Amino acid sequence: MTTYYKTLKADGMSPYQNTKYHLPHDGKPGRWMPYLKGKLVENKHGYHVVNKDQLVCWLDARIFVCETRGKVLDWGAKCGFRPIRLVSELTTWNERTQRLFACDCAEHVLGNFENKYPDDDRPRKAIEVARAFANGTATEEELSAVVSAAYSARSAARSAARSAARSAARSAARSAAVSAAVSAARSAARSAAYSARSAAYSARSAAYSARSAAYSAAYSAERAWQTNRLFEYLDGGDHERRN
């Protein structure tokens, strides 16, 4: 049986639609949302939820397990239902695990940058300090300092991408890898989403010159890796992992 998830902002609102959901309370599920009549249309009409493989693309501050009724419409990147309710919240998804997951995603593709710039450790330091901050062993001042340094590294990588037409895909991969590192050191919930997207883009760009099949395969493989890592955190396992 497929488990479906709903991601919401910290205030319980949908990140993309102005919808307030009934949240679980005192161990009890939230109320069923109103039944929707008429044709379900992606991004316009329907309660949007995601399955396990889709979740990493829609991360936000909170993740809930959903109960659904009726026929599912699978739109590829997400699914649609007429009625849903939020059954329980995944409390293992919190500021700490959000930051750690973001660090893992960034670190996983950091080689795309370091292979070209082996002496530039600014992105790696940003990831290390962001991880330490998540674990309570670094200060906000230390985090701000490495974010500024990582921004500088990202600017340099983007400049290289613009000036190197022949190796545009590889340059884009390096730039995206640094973007993942920068994202990992920012605010918790959004850092997880941005870092995962940048890391997947980095993997995809690195394979671009090997034609579209490899390009798509690299993206899919990175998303699969991210999903596995995400659920290690959500399942409440050891959060002190390395690649």
Image (cartoon, rainbow, N blue to C red):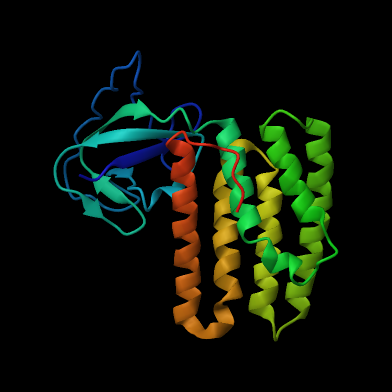
Q: Position of residue 196 (x, y in %)?
A: 55, 53
Q: Position of residue 9 (x, y in %)?
A: 49, 33
Residue drawn 84% across the image and 42% down it: 145
Q: Left or right of 176: which side holds 220? A: left
- Residue at the extreme top: 26
Where's the C terminus, which quadrant? bottom right
Where's the N terminus, which quadrant? top left
Q: Nearer the viewer, residue 55 or 124?
A: 124
Residue drawn 50% across the image and 62% down it: 222
The quarter holding residue 119 reads: bottom right
Residue drawn 46% across the image and 73% down it: 216
Q: Position of residue 171 (x, y in %)?
A: 70, 74
Q: Left or right of 200: which side holds 90? A: left
Q: Left or right of 178: which side holds 76? A: left
- Residue at the extreme left: 70
Q: Nearer the viewer, residue 15 or 209?
A: 209
Residue drawn 16% across the image and 46% down it: 38
Relative to 26, residue 39 above or below? below
The quarter holding residue 13 reads: top left
